[in-house]
Image: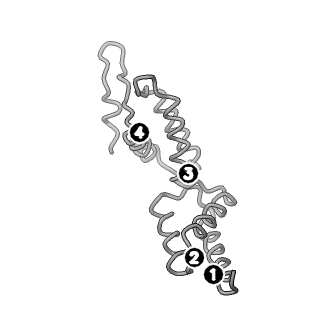
Amino acid sequence: MMANETAATARYAELMKLQLLGRRFLDREEERRLLEEGLTRYGLSLDQANGLLRASAEEHGTALEAELGKSTRELLKTMADRRGRVSRQDFGRTVAFYRARAGGDLPEAEAQKRVKRLMEEMGLQARPNGRVVRSRRWYRAIES
């Protein structure tokens, strides 16, 4: 590594520390913006910028939406029945997991939207809920 490349890497690492200071969650748009800045402003490769971002996030205990999505998808797979349906209770548990991993900074409604989006991406459906009249109204009520 050349001296100016090492200096750029060190400056970008310091920027990551500053950006993640006191943050518990970083969404995809913010993550992308930080990676673009590493590429354009600091001349790093995507792998270098991504590695520094992930290392800094790990060090500061900041959850990245992309990483959180992977673990949430795995949880949804285990919660779904053999027909690919998720119950209301299991959906609620998954939302609670998502919020806990995001550091609790994410509002309940936003976490519900994100988990619903993940379910739709995976082709999972909501299991009808109710004793007399079973419906998916609880799921449809969540804004997309």
Q: Position of residue 8 (x, y in %)?
A: 63, 81
Label 4, label 3: how many angstroms apart (C-alpha)? Answer: 16 Å
The image's colour scheme reads one colour
Label 1, label 3: how many angstroms apart (C-alpha)? Answer: 26 Å
Q: Which residue is mark 2?
A: 44
Say if 109 sits above or below 9 in the image. above
Q: Are marks 3 and 2 in contact (CB under 8 Å)?
A: no
Label 1, label 2: how many angstroms apart (C-alpha)? Answer: 8 Å
Label whose residue precedes the other's in the sequence (1 or 2): 1
Which element is circle 4 on? helix
Picture residue at 50% right of the left edge, 47% below the top: 69
Label 3, label 2: how many angstroms apart (C-alpha)? Answer: 22 Å
Would you call the spot at circle 2 few (<14 residues within 10 Å), some (14-19), or many (20 or more)?
Answer: many
Q: Which residue is mark 1?
A: 8
Q: Which residue is mark 4?
A: 122
Say if 46 sits above or below 111 in the image. below
Label 4, label 2: how many angstroms apart (C-alpha)? Answer: 33 Å
Q: Position of residue 18 (x, y in %)?
A: 62, 71
The three-letter amino acid code for the residue at tag 1 is Ala
